[in-house]
Amino acid sequence: MTHQGFTLWLTGMSGAGKSTLAERITDRLRAAGAKVELLDGDVVRTHLSKGLGFSKEDRDINIRRIGFVCELLTRNGVIAVVAAISPYRAVREEVRERIGRFVEVYMHCPVEVLAERDVKGLYKKALAGEISQFTGVTDPYEPPVRPEVAVDSGVDSVESGEERVWQFLKREGLIRE
Amino acid sequence: MTHQGFTLWLTGMSGAGKSTLAERITDRLRAAGAKVELLDGDVVRTHLSKGLGFSKEDRDINIRRIGFVCELLTRNGVIAVVAAISPYRAVREEVRERIGRFVEVYMHCPVEVLAERDVKGLYKKALAGEISQFTGVTDPYEPPVRPEVAVDSGVDSVESGEERVWQFLKREGLIRE
């Protein structure tokens, strides 16, 4: 497989399936011989953003740092896959502008479904007021207006989400099998 | 020119000529067709480490963040050139271990010479006690024990420093002309 450098940016609320989809795509790209790096929000926080909190300002700084790394990777021919809540539209647009080849994947899932699943038990706590600044409950999430790919993880299977992203990348010529 | 991914890490006190040499090497590598990124300490502070101070702890965090980015670039075949005071030996060794293909360039210059040149007027202030935590004056600098290349910018010209680094990279097979 040949490919260009680009950034695949998965945004969405906690539990919407960003990490799972990001890992699958990363594995598939790597198996096909691509140069690819996965920057998962939780992991990146320890490497780039330890000490930052969850205020809008700190969240924006976190996203800019991830964006800076993506920019370096992308312009050197590497695929950067990001899974990060990244709730604010303006800073997502800002990193999109900087990076250039940028594919935004909106992992949508109704908050009721997320709260019902509640894999990490966070929604229950957030709804009970035990977690402040929890995206989608006590903190805003601004959905993308025109994401390149939208996946509704309340309806779509992981496989179909992965396939949709993969076909988009092929159609745009970002990857060539 | 063909090359491997590696990290070229310039360490030394403020004014020792790290940025100048790093820029020259980066330009030469880029002109030869290499994939190369320059991470200059001052620039990187705005992108990765805004808010960090100059305590040992904060300096170490800064170096680890730069090291993390270098690791991603290096393992994807990109040359990362770093110019950062990076005064503490232990964290330099830590990033060396993580990165693997790591070339340490020690930019040495006696503090008397630096204070005499004092391009940015910082040594005068530091010696007058107006800047706390100034490396080499009121804060430690731990020189590398076995740097791959050592340049004494009090004696060597910029050209000879550049040539010494270039020849080292060729000899090690990191670049092939």
Image (spheres, coloured by chain):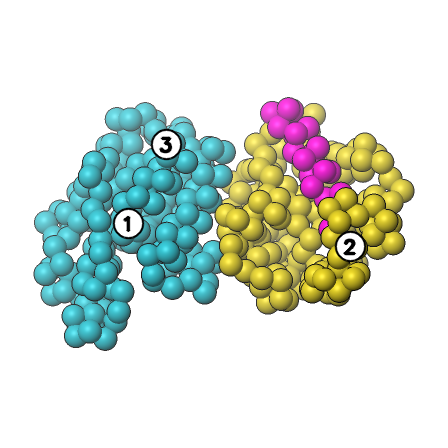
Chain colours: A cyan, B yellow
Tell which subunit mark 3 falls on: A
Circle 3 SS class? loop
Question: Does the stretch in magenta take in A95?
Answer: no
Q: Nearer the viewer, mark 2 or mark 1?
A: 2
**Which residues are the magenta region?**
B14-33
Distance CA(mark 1)–CA(mark 3): 20 Å
> Residue at label 1?
A88
Circle 2 SS class? helix
Is any atom of residue B166 visible in this view? yes
Q: Nearer the viewer, mark 2 or mark 3?
A: 2
> Residue at label 3?
A101
The residue at 16%/70% (across/down) is A127
Nearer the observer, B12 or B96:
B12
Residues packed near mark 2 inside 10 Å, few (<14), some (14 to 19) or many (20 plus): many
Answer left or right for B116 relative to B103.
right
The residue at 74%/52% (across/down) is B122
The answer to which image quadrant residue A140 occupies is bottom left
**Residue B1 place in picture, x, y as percent:** 64, 25
Q: Amino acid at mark 2?
A: Tyr
**Residue A55 place in picture, x, y as percent:** 34, 61
The answer to which image quadrant residue B21 occupies is top right
Q: Amino acid at mark 3?
A: Arg
Q: Nearer the viewer, mark 1 or mark 3?
A: 1
Circle 1 SS class? loop
Per the rendering, the mark at residue A116 is: none
Distance CA(mark 2)–CA(mark 3): 44 Å
